Image: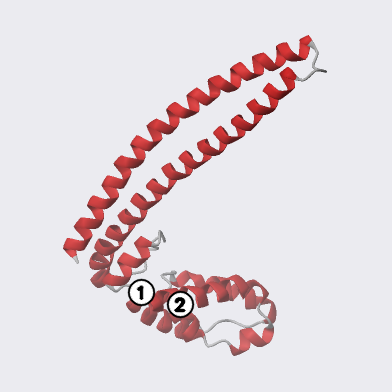
């Protein structure tokens, strides 16, 4: 199912991204049932046919709505399988409400499980990115402090410049301290989010 989802998303994305530039030949030759299937299995609504209709209108070509809907319904049946629901949520994709009533409850239950895993992983990555950004700033400050210190002791530096540099050094040193405190706080937050993610993964392992 994971391979099917990836293939279908890629094909459908290609069709939709290029539909605005579809040639007359493409509009005439398109298998509308296949196009509907690819959109359905990618979780796109049946309203996606509007993009094809707009792209082909200049050539006086109208998509075969009945064929498209037939293919879309078949694709949706594949998309709405419970296992695929987890994968869709796990990848952070939005659910567009395409599943019929008989399939939606199980699909959504699995989708929500996958989406929660995605959200927990994203939350952890966000904290890690913030920590990395602050470490980069600390490195930058270290370089700036070294440069300013070297300028202060240089023979050609005027007293006025030295005074300005001393003030700048004091400000950078203060910023270093503040960033170090932020890193400590973020590291504690990261530990909590790692624990939440680990615990959730354990519940998933038990459930499956």
Dot 1: element: helix
> Which percent across, then down, holds residue 139?
57, 35
Mark toward the viewer: 1 or 2? 2
Q: Residue at point 49% right, 42% down?
A: 132
| Left or right: 160, with 121 as reference point | right
Q: Taking 25 as reference, is 184 above or below it?
A: above
| Label 1 close to label 2 by CB (< 8 Å) | yes
Residue 47, horizontal then vertical, whole percent: 47, 70
Nearer-the-camera pick, 87 or 27: 87
Disc 2 is placed on an element classified as: helix
Q: Give percent across and percent down for residue 185.
A: 38, 31
Mark found first going from the N terminus, 1 or 2: 2
As drawn, which residue projects farthest toward the right? 156
Q: Is residue 140 above or below residue 108?
A: above
Task: Give the label on residue 8, or none.
Answer: 2
Q: Residue at the spot x=56%, y=72% of the render? A: 16
Report which residue position mark 1 lands on: 79
Characterize the local packing of mark 1: few (<14), some (14-19) or many (20 or more) Cα atoms within 10 angstroms. many
Q: Nearer the viewer, residue 100 or 186?
A: 186
The image shows a total of numbered marks equal to: 2
Residue 170, above or below 134: above
Q: Quadrant of residue 53?
A: bottom right
Residue at x-position 34% and y-position 67%: 87
Image quarter for residue 72? bottom left
Category of crowding for the residue at label 2, using alpha-carbon neighbours closer than 10 angstroms: few (below 14), some (14–19), many (at least 20): many
Location of the N terminus (image quadrant): bottom left
Query: Colour scheme in the image?
Result: secondary structure
Q: Quadrant of the C terminus?
A: bottom left
Using the numbered discs, state the Cα–Cα distance from disc 1 to disc 2 in whole angstroms: 10 Å
Comparing 104 with 42, the one in front is: 42
User: What residue appears at the point 23 percent right and 72 percent down from the top-left corner?
Assistant: 102
């Amino acid at each position: 199912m994971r391979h099917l989802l990836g293939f279908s998303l890629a094909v459908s994305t290609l069709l939709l991204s290029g539909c605005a530039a579809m040639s007359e030949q493409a509009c005439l030759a398109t298998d509308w049932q296949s196009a509907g299937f690819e959109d359905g299995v990618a979780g796109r609504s049946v309203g996606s046919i509007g993009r094809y209709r707009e792209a082909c209108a200049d050539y006086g070509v109208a998509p075969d709505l009945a064929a498209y809907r037939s293919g879309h319904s078949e694709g949706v049946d594949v998309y709405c399988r419970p296992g695929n629901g987890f994968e869709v949520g796990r990848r952070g994709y939005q659910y567009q409400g395409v599943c019929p009533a008989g399939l939606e409850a199980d699909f959504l239950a699995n989708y929500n499980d996958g989406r929660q895993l995605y959200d927990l992983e994203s939350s952890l990555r966000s904290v890690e990115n913030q920590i990395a950004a602050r470490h980069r700033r600390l490195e930058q400050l270290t370089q700036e402090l070294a440069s300013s210190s070297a300028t202060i002791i240089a023979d050609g530096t005027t007293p006025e410049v030295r005074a300005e540099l001393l003030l700048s050094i004091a400000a950078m040193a203060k910023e270093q301290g503040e960033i170090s405190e932020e890193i400590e706080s973020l590291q504690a937050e990261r530990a909590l989010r790692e624990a939440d993610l680990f615990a959730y993964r354990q519940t998933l392992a038990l459930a499956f």
